Amino acid sequence: MSMSFKIRALAIVAGGLLLGAVPATFAAESPNAGIDQSSFVSIGGIDQWISIKGEDRRNPVLLVVHGGPGESQWPVADKYEPWEKAFTVVLWDQRGAGHTYGRYGAKTPDFSLKRIARDGIEVTEYLRRTLAKKKIIVLGHSWGSTVATAMVQLKPELFAAYVGTGQAASWKATSNMRFDLALAKAREDGDAVTVKQLEEKGPPDPNDPEQAFAVNIWAAMAPSDQAWIGSLRAHIPELKAKYPKDFQDFQDGFQFSVEHALPDQMQLDLPKTASKVGTAFFIIQGEHDVMTPTQAAIDYFNGVSAPTKELILIPGAGHFAFMTAPDAFLAGLIDKVRPVAIARGA
């Protein structure tokens, strides 16, 4: 694994305060009772970890498809607690990530976007059976928006709504826009050294991932994203000491997924391959996302044909808007997504 890939993986490697694997607990049988359960479920021929939490089973089910690749969300499960009043929230450690990676390690079989999207369909079917729902909402962040889009392309009838955040669009557009944003920021800051370096190198070759990841976008990132990543890094020593096995699985799964997802990421071109979406289509995007540039997400949104669609931009937020602007993000989910999803069968 090259140094640039290691830096990318370690930039977000600690997802927050790690929690030990929670034993499954089951709520009462009342139809409006809450639910709090976590367990391994057979998905795609392997055991995959799924957590289901919510205060009222009558609420719409919202499946979170994590980014990274490999950035399982169970370490930051507490951040989703406010969501659980209006949704039954499902966290899923994808093939090659978190607890699921911990079961199989480097022997994890058949890692590919197509396989993980099919896994996502199986997770959705499991949720429909378990929670007695006709349709669910799927929310994808970053790499997860790629997976979730592929899921909706495969079986649109299973989903009442799609929500993308840190929305991916195309590898080429992302590569070019990151370079432009880094150069613009360096010029704005009067950073002559960086300006010279970027101008001499020119835009990265989209066919060379080393060049793409070599563009340093840290200075151009939203301050809220910088603070979020900084807070995660600060917890690493504590996490290693307190949860050595869980942290190691998280870290190793992240690195494994980053490496194995790269071929699919480089082929990504959603404006061409997913311009028609067969369900309600929402993007809730940080206005200053430079990791999956907001302009690329807007361009993709504008080209999408869907039964209904809406773009919500969050001022001041970046790639991790769902974590760094929680009130605005949740308001978008409750005020915009939830009523549409309910009307469409959630």
Image: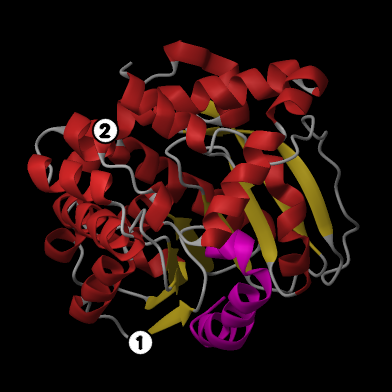
| Most foreground residue, 26 or 99 | 99
| Most foreground residue, 81 or 297 | 297
Disc number for residue 308: 1
Disc number for residue 334: none
Q: Is residue 74 visible?
A: no
On the image, the x and y values in percent for residue 311 come to 39, 82
SS assignment at label 2: helix
On the image, the x and y values in percent for residue 50 come to 64, 41
| Most foreground residue, 130 or 64 | 64
Of pointers 1 and 2, the one earlier in the residue sequence: 2
Residue type for callout 1: Thr
Q: Which residues are magenta?
A: 321-346
Residue type for callout 2: Leu
Residue that appears at 65% across and 64% down: 132
SS assignment at label 1: loop
Residue that appears at 85% across and 48% down: 26
Q: Which residue is mark 2?
A: 262
On the image, the x and y values in percent for residue 90 come to 64, 54
Residue that appears at 52% across and 47% down: 123
Image quadrant in which the N terminus is located:
top left
In the drawing, does residue 301 fall left or right of residue 218? left
| Most foreground residue, 114 or 294 | 294
Q: Is residue 67 above or below residue 31?
A: above
Mark 1 closeness class: few <14, some 14–19, many ≥20 residues within 10 Å: few
The picture quadrant where one finds residue 325 is: bottom right
- Indicate which label's residue lies in the foreground, 1 or 2: 2
Image quadrant in which the C terminus is located:
bottom right
